[in-house]
Amino acid sequence: MADKIIHTSVILNCSIESAFNYFADNDLLTKWLTNNADVEMKEGGKYELFWTPKDPDPTNNSTYGCKVLAVERPYYLNIEWRGNAEQKEFMNNVRPLTNVTVLFLPLERKKTKVTLIHTGWRQDDNWEAARQYFINAWIIAFKQLEELVNI
């Protein structure tokens, strides 16, 4: 089964440590990606983001239950990823879950390239629709991050 990879990058006008923190720090995550974050930045730690935090079902529109699979601060982050409420029936009950890798490359002292790779997509129409959704979602999210950092 050929994997269909989502790939996006952004250049941030900040140090590699600062760029990494936008993916690792709960407060910074809520400034550009999510409404609520519960992240433990260690291997096996939680990577739970909530877009509708008041929803009584924590599995709707969240990465509830996702873990940090690997981390090498400030260069590399690998996490599990779940689908939203419309996608959870098929995306959230498979093993392995989809996988997000974020790479941080210092270009200059105050400039960092951030590259995101989202893999693990299966081969039917539901999965392809979910992949298209996340292509757009990551583009929008990275634009928000760029606007926040590169003011």
Image (cartoon, rainbow, N blue to C red):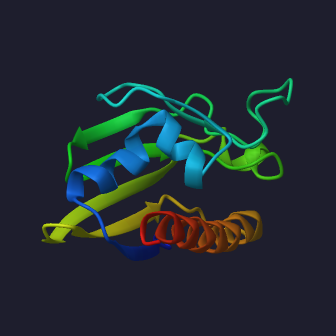
Q: How far across and down, in percent of the image, does residue 116 sit?
A: 40, 65
> How many numbered badges does the structure rendering display?
0
Residue 45 appears left or right of 56? left
Return the residue nearer the eye: 45 or 119: 45
Return the residue nearer the eye: 31 or 66: 31
Give the residue drawn at x 49%, y 34%.
Answer: 26
Residue 44 appears left or right of 93? left
Residue 14 vertical position relative to residue 89 in the rendered view, above or below: below
Res. 81 visible in picture? no
Q: How far across and down, in percent of the image, does residue 59 sit?
A: 74, 32
Residue 93 vertical position relative to residue 7 in the rendered view, above or below: above
Res. 107 visible in picture? yes
Q: How far across and down, in percent of the image, does residue 57 sit?
A: 82, 26
Q: Residue 15 lies in what quarter of the image?
A: bottom left
Give the residue drawn at x 58%, y 65%.
Answer: 141
Q: How far across and down, in percent of the image, does residue 38 sit?
A: 54, 28
